[in-house]
Image: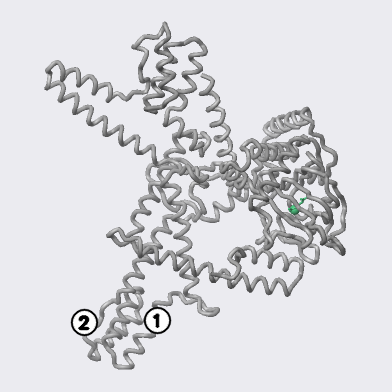
Amino acid sequence: LPDEPRITYEMLYEQAVQAYTDERWAECHGLMLRAVDDWQYFSGVQVLCRRKCNAAADVGVEYPNDDVDNFRFFEHALRNAYCLLRCERQRFGGRPEGLDPAIMKKFQEREHYDYLQICAFKLGKIAEAVSYAYTFLMGNLGHDVMISNLQFYRSHADVTPDMFVDTLMDEYKKEFLNALEHYDTGNYELTASVLELVLTEYLQALGDCRLLCEGPYAERNDKYDMYIAISNHFLQTLRCKDACNARATAVYDKLYPELLSNIYHYLQYCYFKTGDHRNAGAAVESYLHLNPDDADMQFNKEFYVQTGADESYFVVRPEAVKFRRFRDHLARLLDYDEYTFSNIAVTIYDSDLGIDVSDTDDITWGALGADDAAVAADEQVKRADGPEEAPEEAAARRRRQEETQRDYGARGVHVEFTEKENNVSKRFLAGGFASEAECRQLVQLAEDGVQLGDGYRPDDPYIHSQSEQFAGMTPGRGYRLARDGAVTPEVVNLFLRLGEQVREFMESYFALRTRLYFTYTHLVCRTAVAGRQYDRGDDMSHPIHGDNCILKSDGSCAKEPPAYTWRDYSALLYLNDDFEGGDFVFADSRKHVIAQVKPHCGRVVSFSSGEENLHGVRAVTDGRRCAIAMWFTLDPRHDEIERVEAEREIASMLELARENERHSEL
Ligand SMILES: O=C(O)CCC(=O)C(=O)O
Ligand SMILES: [Fe+2]
């Protein structure tokens, strides 16, 4: 075990990059070397475990890693996935993708009939209510509450036995009941023929039901069908394995086309020289197996034979067979996936990317180049503020957005300060996004989250200053705390909802032409460490920086990794003012402050994330300063998956609570 298991290469890397940015060269050097060590340890463990477990997971059949026979399954899945995407795209058209698996499950389990029965009952439609209740029960046999509901209905004067019908009953079940009647009347020939029919239909229904199971994986925020999800993952591993070739054949600064062939080339010569004709023959044959058209080696082979080598020496070595099988198969599969997307579904679904998504029954593999996809995606991002929008569309959008602005105004949101460049807003300051009570709840949530373990760690690399603790909570952590009962789902919902309001406001305020997506959300507090406040000098809570670029010492800001280059807009929703210091500041490229903002509850500062908005936070010298920090993107590929998942899970927790209430009312 490493000395400090909680310090990862990732943290060290980020710290090193920060040190680099701040031109603390010695620290950068030291930290990056520690990162190298930890990465080696980390990747070594992964290889060890994957190899060990593959061997240990014995089921009587061997499934070695990287054996091409195991690709067959995935190849089938891959074709299946492409077909599914096209087929559904054609039939569903503009239907929103990625429907909520939780609601899908409710429909499969007839949950909606529970609502239906209550609504029908309240409307005085007794017969309907009974059939809906009964239909629900048939999908949820033994459901206590519904059984007692039905007992209640039975005692109702207007209820008759014929109302107890399963409105969703499959035909084959009805036919089965008919068959039993024929049987009772002794008509066996008819019984048999009906039962044959029932059998066929039953198997068909069973098959249909099983197919409905191939939906999205409900546990993760993965909205794709099973095969699509597997394929995405599989393609990712394939591309990764393909890249291994280049990595494995680079020797110093030279890239050998294929190291194994090279080695055989050397070997055949060495063995020939040592008089080991058997091994020389095997090396020649192995080389030719990998490079069948190599005229020089064919010439060598003839020469060896003429000088007395036995034909039987020319056998391909087993590892060459294996190597070539893998190589050819990989090439073939990657050929299908010529348009190496990180995620096949994103591309096929997203008609906005300007890609032809028409469903052709013969699937053409590799119809698109990788660059096409990338360029199309880039263009979409540019379109967000680019000129291509029909005038009437633009006018309609602006009307909607101005209406949103008025709505927020009516709810108490007011813009205090704004700054434009070429008539385009680049930053604003507004108030009224949260009430005092809401702010208090969220500060409490942040404190609970911190006490329960996240955020503050003595070794946390995100501490920008030794004089402050920096601790936060993401939406996912909020959800997990709610799930474990440590905080209420309501307060986590508040956290998410206030953020969403800021997002909606920004989208209209910045007059965006495409949707603004969350990409990262962090409820975060900076707490002054008592006794470490003397002599802070220029020390800031958060040094001047750009949110999507790396600020260089010459004042330029490089929009390149490891910066979060996809971040397009930023916002901070402040939650309190009972602390000293902590002003938010905008700065110019020489780090001179050009504007400053005092945080207080409900106040939002928002800006485009680039070098036009360099900013920082002044030292917090007493107390705790809390805010919801949010970053946004116009690129749907960087949507904040954790938030989407947390929103869904919290919504279903709240729904469940309401449902329990509803059941106890009846
Ligand atoms: O908390 C603030 O006011 C600003 C924080 C910030 O700029 C950041 O986290 O990137
Ligand atoms: Fe920032």
Q: Specify whether 594 is left or right of 480.
A: right
**Alpha-carbon neighbours of circle 1 within 10 Å: few (<14), some, or many (≥20)?**
few
Compared to residue 633, the image places residue 184 above or below, namely: above
Residue 513 visible in the current orientation: yes
Q: Which color scheme is applied?
A: one colour
Q: Specify whether 141 is left or right of 619.
A: left
Which residue is drawn at the image coordinates 46% and 38% (left, top)?
89
Q: Amino acid at mark 2?
A: Ser
Compared to residue 541, the image places residue 352 above or below, namely: above
Most foreground residue, 350 or 639: 639
Which residue is drawn at the image coordinates 23% and 27% (left, top)?
198
Residue beneath disc 1: 263
Residue beneath disc 2: 312
Q: Position of residue 199 (x, y in %)?
A: 22, 30
Which residue is drawn at the image coordinates 35% and 60% (left, top)?
57
Q: Amino acid at mark 1?
A: Ile
